[in-house]
Structures are given as C-alpha cells and as structure tokens.
Image: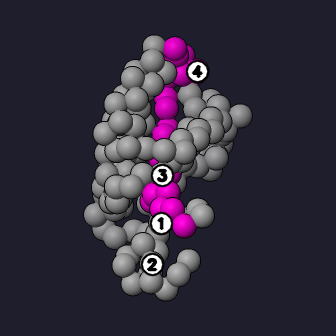
Amino acid sequence: MRSQDLKHGLSKREKVIGKTVGFPYTLKLDLDDPNSAVSEQVWGIIYHRLTAVEKFFRMKNINTVTKLTKHGSHDIITFTTDKQLTDYDIVFLQLLLLSDWKRELFNWLRVRSGCKKWNVLYKQKFDKNMKLISREI
C-alpha cells in the first residue's frame, strides 16, 4: 500500500490492482434454535434480512462459514463494503440477523466500555462448576 493511501485514511482498505475493494468486516452470529438445529424458517428470515442489508450497505465478496453447535449454529459472515462501519454498526447488524440477543447486549456493553476484543464466539461453554454445557460440533 502506498504511503499516499495511509495519509488519506485508507489504511484499512484492501487494494487490488490499484482499485479500492472496500473495508473488510466480519459478522459473528450465534443462532440458537429450541430444536437444536436452526430451522429453514429462521434461515429464510436471515436470508431476507441479509439481502436487504447487502443492498443498503453495498456489501461485496460475501462469504459464510457455519459450525453447528448443541443449540443451533455459529455463523461467520465476511464481506467488504465501501462504507466505513463502527463496532456499534456490527453489533446492530448481528442483532438484526437474529444473533442471540443476550450475546449482542453484552457485545454492545463491551463496545461501550472500550473493550478491543468484544466480538467473540466460544467453541466451548462451561457452567459455574466448569462442567461442559455446549460446544461446536
């Protein structure tokens, strides 16, 4: 990347053959479903919302990875956009895309308090007695 780009605040942008692709972002969704597998109905809602968000934020290069959990799935969505998003925007988008509302409440509180690593998905969860209660499959 040229020093000229750094001076103009483009340090976070990716450069490909001299063209600006956009700012890279990652959404981390914790999707819980009482049936222990995220239903087609839930995926239909997520798809509908993601399609609207994709148009509004001019999202490009969208990739998804899904890992099943005991109570649903962890879904990672990476994308680029020419819009610069804040951490608050990312929390809002995750909530809009049906990520667990309690997780997103804590994420929002972490962002407000200035925590740098606020957007985490745990591969394993333990109760207060350190008994394994959930893990990615």
Bounds of the magenta segment: 18-40
Measure the alpha-carbon separation of dots 1 and 4.
36 Å
Q: Earlier in the sequence, mark 1 or mark 3?
A: 1
Identify the residue under disc 3: 80
- Residue 48 higher or lower than 24, as above or below: above
User: Do callouts 3 and 4 mark residues in contact (Cβ within 8 Å)?
Assistant: no
The amino acid beneath tag 2 is: Asp
Q: Are marks 1 and 2 in contact (CB under 8 Å)?
A: yes
Q: Is residue 122 visible?
A: yes
Residue type, numbered disc 1: Arg
Res 136 → quadrant: top right
80 sits to left or right of 131: left
Indicate the amino acid at tag 4.
Ala
Residue furthest toward the front? Answer: 18
Q: CA distance from mark 2 to mark 4?
A: 45 Å
For disc 2, the marked residue is 5
Magenta run includes residue 11: no
Cα–Cα gap, marks 1 and 2: 9 Å
Q: Which of the two discs, 3 and 2, sits closer to the camera? A: 2
- The kind of residue on which mark 3 rests is Thr
Q: Position of residue 5 (x, y in %)?
A: 45, 78
- x then y, percent, for residue 81: 42, 51
Q: Please indicate, yes or no, whether residue 25 appears anywhere in the rendered image.
A: no
What secondary structure characterizes most of the magenta part?
A: strand
Q: Is 61 rendered above or below residue 39? A: below
Q: Residues within 10 Å of mark 3 (few under 14, many from 20)?
A: many
Where is mark 1, residue-wise?
Answer: 13
Residue 113 percent across, percent down from the top left: 30, 68
